[in-house]
Image (spheres, helix red, strand yellow):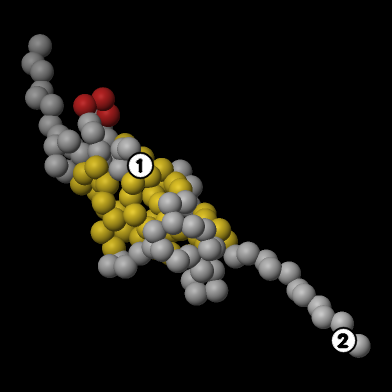
Amino acid sequence: MYRFPDVNEPPTKLTISGNTVPENSPNGTVVGILSSDDPEKTHQNFTYDIIGPPVVPFVLGGADGKTLLISGTIDYEVTPYINISVRVRDSGGLSLERQLRITVKGQYWGVVYTILG
């Protein structure tokens, strides 16, 4: 029986566990955890990078480098969502890029009435 050699294939999926964050959340707040799929699942380690836009209020951190964290100002009135481009690279150097949308939840501050007189 002939066995075909295993050929490295690129990742096929890139997702995030959460994509909603309250406005004005402090730096270090977890937005979500990135995950990927690859035909060679058991033989792969993945690395992740934010590749765009040039300025985003997020960084990747955590012990494994796949936790999306807030690192800047998040303001619903400025933008109710933020698109970021993320690249995942497998152990063989092949990659997949995806755009992820992070939704910013506005905070209702209520109405304050002052009674004069």
- Could you tell whether 101 is left or right of 37 in the image? right
- Could you tell whether 89 is left or right of 22 in the image? left
Amino acid, disc 1:
Gly
Q: Look at the image and tell me whether residue 70 can be seen.
A: yes
* Element class at badge 1: loop
- Residue 66's x, y, as percent? 33, 43
Where 97 falls versus 54 (above or below)? above
Q: Residue at x 81, y 78 (%)?
A: 113
Instruction: Give the farthest residue toward the right.
Output: 117
Instruction: Give the farthest residue toward the bottom.
Output: 117
Quarter of the figure with the N terminus: top left
Nearer to us: label 1 or label 2: 2
- Give the CA separation, mark 1 to mark 2: 52 Å
Q: Residue at x 30, y 43 (%)?
A: 65
Q: Look at the image and tell me whether residue 36 can be seen.
A: no
- Residue 17's x, y, as percent? 46, 43
Where 92 falls versus 52 (above or below)? above
Q: Quadrant of residue 54?
A: bottom left
Q: What residue does disc 2 label?
A: 116
Q: Are marks 1 and 2 in contact (CB under 8 Å)?
A: no
Quarter of the figure with the C terminus: bottom right
Which of 81/29 is in front? 29
Q: Which mark is residue 62?
A: 1
Q: Residue at x 55, y 58 (%)?
A: 22
Q: Quadrant of residue 106?
A: bottom right
Mark sitting earlier along the chain (1/2):
1
- Residue 5's x, y, as percent? 9, 24
- Alpha-carbon neighbours of circle 1 within 10 Å: few (<14), some, or many (≥20)? few
- Could you tell whether 96 is left or right of 80 in the image? left
Which of 11/114 is in front? 114
